[in-house]
């Protein structure tokens, strides 16, 4: 450290600066006299304290009382109006800006709370509001004006005419201030919705015409923007005869802001005018405005680019071919505005005026991206490739993020409009998926499933065998997008992307998912530190597993889930295993869960970490497989029993109805849906067996084209999804035939379905419960508890029994790992992985 004289002198200067900084802090401390002045007697009531503070307190105390005025009105409205409100009026005469703004908000809150009647409110508060409308501070004046406009909505006509409209005649005169006339314009626009057309024509329209001809351009512009509300109140005929001539005259005004207001009002009123008015009166005005826009201020270009889509839609059908082409070229020019001037210079070297101009150009291109779907309709989707594709390409590759963000939001609408021509924008989809900005990616993935579905089924051919060949770069782009999201700090974008990846089984092949995405889901579940992201990856992995068409791959995934999560050393991984079990129950059938995941989950009853045991308790509450009194002794010590018996979840288990009639009535639909899921899983195995036989016989696997042809031959309803197979309803316990023809017949009879369609199909199941078959005791098949046992549900209890008729679904030669997290050589029955020598018994005690 340098201790030279110069250095020490510098340190002394720093200390002096610190001393100077501290002085205002010391001066801001309150003296005892000031503290005494701010102290209020605690025995005073709320009303008395409010009156005292408004009379003798400081401004900050008065502001606090006014902010608390809505509470006083709710508590004691009569005393507040009699004692507090007069003091508020007196304080507002000399109040500062902060107190005025607080009073405006409080008065509006009292109106919204309906603490008093409308008549009482108008008598007590309306004059105070009108008195401060012309406050010298613009912010205060606008705050009181917003309160008044809200009050106008509820006041009766007589009060409006006497208290507001009649005084407005004098307030709108040229002799009044500009601020008074501006307030009059906004009030007139609001009053038109409260009177009939005749009263508006006689009392309001003369004032409107006068203000449209005001000498100040601000007043003309303000009144012009209120003409839209006035037109909606007076009807079509008066709008054509009174409002339209005023708009045409204002569109030629010398003030640019007035012309801009007239243009925007004309665009918003296009639906009111007929074809003749549009073609003969409005179209020439619009053409002139567009031609002069490049010579005017950039703010006009911003407004024009924002309203161009609505303008082209409203004038569609009256354009000549030349006018149509001219407007299209004008739009294309706006889409590239400012791009020609980029020279790669550093922003510090560019003058501030040029930077401000470039920001306005970016806003213009952003608005053009917003209006792109409307322009597709304008040119007809059939002409997209010739007319607008190059413009769409420029917008997707725009150097500014806001432009690419906006076009990413519109990408789904563009895809829908192109329909069979959606293949034209495949490359742009890949470009946006690979965009360096996560904001663009976040905007795109909001509708990613719908976009990918259109991409896979659209184009020149709707056969799904072309889905991979038409999107060769889709898989690398999706994986790269996920890695960029994972490497960033925006975990919500990462979570949403993983949730949207659940649509991939409908777009790409099972092998592509297994080798490119499924392993990545495992990595995220094991290594990511954000819980919502881990859960999203877990659910997406379960969906990938559900639609995987190879049994060996399914068993490998299940084995990893049990070994790396269920038997993991970290309690965090074991918790994620239970989350995965919850998703398995949601997506798969109960028999699938019980065959592969039930025993590994039950082994966690011995987990040394209480959080894991409690999570298992929550899972059992949702699944309702076993009762609380059977499971609690396995994982809770005496202290934990005392604590968790008071848990709402445990009490919910106590209230579970085990009566067979109530059970059957409550869960009948879910049980039928579960049976359908089990049939689908059996069908998936049969399809896989057919593919193996086909591969052995012909030396090649069954192609997606063949599978799709068989699905179409099955007369599948077109309103259902095409990727979730379902068997024809029938007995799942029938003796399976080894005949190849019967298996093919089952495959051809397979149909696609989704949960919504199924619920719609069985929406009236309660009507069928009177049949003998539906009132029989329901016995769910819970296979996999042991190789020789299953659970049977009766009226009295769950009991274990040996059976030789276990379902054959998901039979595999692949051995799954032991359900115990102990060593494989342990002889402890609790840790043994043997299922044959240690059959599990689950008894539900009477509750």
Image (cartoon, rainbow, N blue to C red):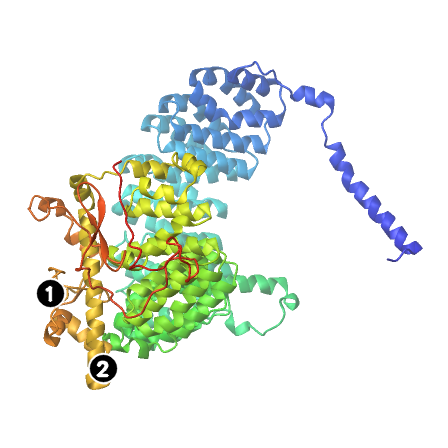
Q: Which image quarter is the C terminus in?
A: top left
**Whether residue 524 can be seen here:** yes
Q: Position of residue 466 (x, y in %)?
A: 27, 78
Helix, strand or loop for disc 2: helix
Residue 69 placement, left or right of 841: right
Q: Which image quarter is the N terminus in?
A: bottom right
Q: Position of residue 493 (x, y in %)?
A: 45, 59
Q: Residues within 10 Å of mark 1 (few under 14, many from 20)?
A: few
Alpha carbon distance from label 2 to label 1: 26 Å
Residue 148 placement, left or right of 794: right
Q: Which is more N-terminal, label 1 or label 2?
A: 2
Q: Please name whichever residue, 519 or 318, is drawn nearer the observer in this view of the structure.
A: 519
**Whether residue 259 can be seen here:** no
Q: Which residue is mark 2?
A: 695
Give the numbered dot on residue 735.
1
Helix, strand or loop for disc 1: loop
Q: Residues within 10 Å of mark 2 (few under 14, many from 20)?
A: few
Q: Position of residue 662 (x, y in %)?
A: 18, 39
Q: Please name whichever residue, 148 or 511, is drawn nearer the observer in this view of the structure.
A: 511
The quadrant where residue 213 appears: top left
């Amino acid at each position: 450290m340098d201790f030279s004289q110069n250095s020490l002198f510098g340190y002394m200067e720093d200390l002096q600066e610190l001393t100077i900084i501290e002085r205002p802090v010391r001066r801001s401390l309150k003296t005892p006299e000031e503290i005494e002045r701010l102290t209020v007697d605690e025995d005073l009531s709320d009303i008395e304290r409010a009156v005292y503070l408004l009379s003798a307190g400081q401004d900050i105390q008065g502001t606090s009382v006014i902010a608390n005025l809505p509470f006083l009105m709710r508590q004691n409205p009569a005393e507040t109006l009699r004692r507090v409100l007069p003091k508020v009026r007196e304080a507002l005469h000399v109040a500062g800006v902060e107190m005025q703004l607080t009073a405006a908000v409080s008065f509006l809150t009292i109106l919204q709370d309906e603490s008093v009647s409308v008549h009482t409110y108008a008598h007590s508060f309306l004059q105070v509001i009108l008195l401060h409308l012309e406050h010298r501070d613009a912010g205060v004046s606008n705050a009181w004006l917003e309160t008044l406009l809200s009050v106008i909505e509820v006041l009766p006509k007589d009060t409006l005419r006497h208290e507001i409209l009649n005084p407005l005649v004098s307030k709108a005169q040229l002799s009044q201030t500009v601020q008074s006339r501006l307030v009059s314009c906004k009030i007139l626009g609001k009053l038109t919705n409260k009177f009939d057309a005749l009263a508006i024509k006689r009392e309001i329209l003369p004032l409107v015409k006068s203000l449209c001809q005001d000498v100040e351009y601000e007043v003309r512009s303000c009144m012009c923007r209120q003409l839209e509300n006035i037109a909606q109140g007076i009807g079509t005929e008066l709008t054509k005869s009174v409002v339209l001539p005023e708009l045409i005259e204002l569109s030629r005004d010398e003030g640019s802001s007035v012309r801009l207001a007239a243009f925007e009002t004309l665009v918003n009123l296009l639906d009111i005018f007929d074809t003749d008015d549009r073609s003969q009166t409005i179209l020439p005005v619009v053409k002139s405005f567009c031609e002069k826009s490049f010579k005017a201020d950039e703010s006009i270009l911003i407004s024009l680019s924002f309203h161009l889509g609505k303008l082209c839609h409203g004038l569609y059908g009256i354009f000549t071919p030349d006018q149509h082409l001219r407007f299209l070229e004008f739009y294309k020019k706006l889409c590239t505005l400012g791009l020609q001037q980029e020279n790669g210079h550093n922003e510090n070297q560019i003058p501030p005026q040029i930077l401000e101009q470039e920001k306005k150009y970016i806003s213009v291109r952003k608005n053009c991206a917003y209006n792109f779907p409307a322009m597709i309709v304008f040119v007809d989707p059939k002409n997209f490739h010739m007319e607008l594709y190059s413009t769409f390409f420029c917008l997707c590759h725009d150097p500014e993020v806001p432009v690419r963000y906006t076009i990413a939001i519109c990408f789904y609408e563009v895809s829908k409009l192109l329909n069979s021509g959606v293949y034209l924008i495949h490359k742009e989809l890949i470009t946006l998926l690979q965009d360096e900005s996560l904001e663009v990616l976040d905007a795109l993935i909001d509708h990613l499933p719908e976009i990918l579905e259109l991409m896979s089924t659209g184009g020149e051919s709707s056969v799904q065998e072309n889905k991979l060949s038409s999107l060769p770069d889709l898989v690398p782009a999706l994986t790269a997008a996920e890695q960029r999201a994972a490497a960033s700090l925006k975990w919500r974008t990462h979570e949403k992307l993983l949730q949207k990846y659940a649509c991939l089984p409908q777009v790409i092949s099972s092998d592509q998912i297994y080798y490119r995405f499924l392993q990545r889901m495992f990595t995220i579940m094991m290594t990511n530190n954000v819980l919502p992201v881990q859960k999203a990856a877990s659910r997406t992995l379960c969906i990938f597993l559900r639609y995987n068409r190879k049994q060996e791959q399914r068993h490998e995934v299940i084995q990893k889930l049990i070994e790396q999560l269920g038997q993991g050393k970290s309690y965090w991984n074991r918790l994620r295993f239970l989350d995965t079990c919850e998703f398995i129950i949601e997506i798969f059938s109960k028999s699938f869960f019980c065959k592969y995941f039930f025993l590994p989950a039950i082994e966690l009853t011995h987990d040394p970490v209480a959080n894991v045991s409690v999570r298992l308790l929550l899972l059992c509450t949702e699944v309702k497989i076993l009762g609380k009194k059977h499971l609690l002794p396995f994982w809770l010590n005496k202290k934990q029993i005392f604590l968790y018996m008071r848990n709402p979840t445990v009490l919910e288990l106590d209230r579970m109805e085990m009566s067979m009639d109530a059970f059957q009535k409550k869960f009948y639909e879910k049980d039928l849906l579960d049976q359908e899921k089990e049939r689908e899983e059996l069908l998936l195995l049969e399809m896989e067996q057919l593919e193996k036989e086909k591969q052995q016989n012909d030396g090649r696997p069954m192609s997606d084209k063949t599978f799709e042809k068989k699905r179409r031959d099955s007369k599948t309803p077109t309103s259902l999804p095409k990727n979730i197979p379902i068997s024809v309803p029938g007995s799942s316990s029938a003796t399976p035939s080894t005949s190849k023809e019967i298996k093919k017949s089952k495959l051809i009879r397979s149909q696609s379905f989704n949960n919504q369609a199924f619920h719609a199909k069985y929406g009236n199941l309660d009507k069928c419960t009177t049949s003998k078959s539906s009132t029989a005791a329901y016995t769910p098949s819970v296979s996999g508890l042991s190789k020789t046992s299953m659970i049977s549900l009766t009226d009295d209890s769950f009991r274990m029994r040996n059976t030789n008729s276990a379902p054959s679904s998901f039979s595999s030669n692949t051995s799954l790992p032991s359900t115990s997290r102990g060593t494989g050589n342990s002889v402890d029955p609790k840790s043994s992985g043997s299922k044959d020598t240690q059959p599990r018994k689950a008894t539900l005690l009477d509750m």
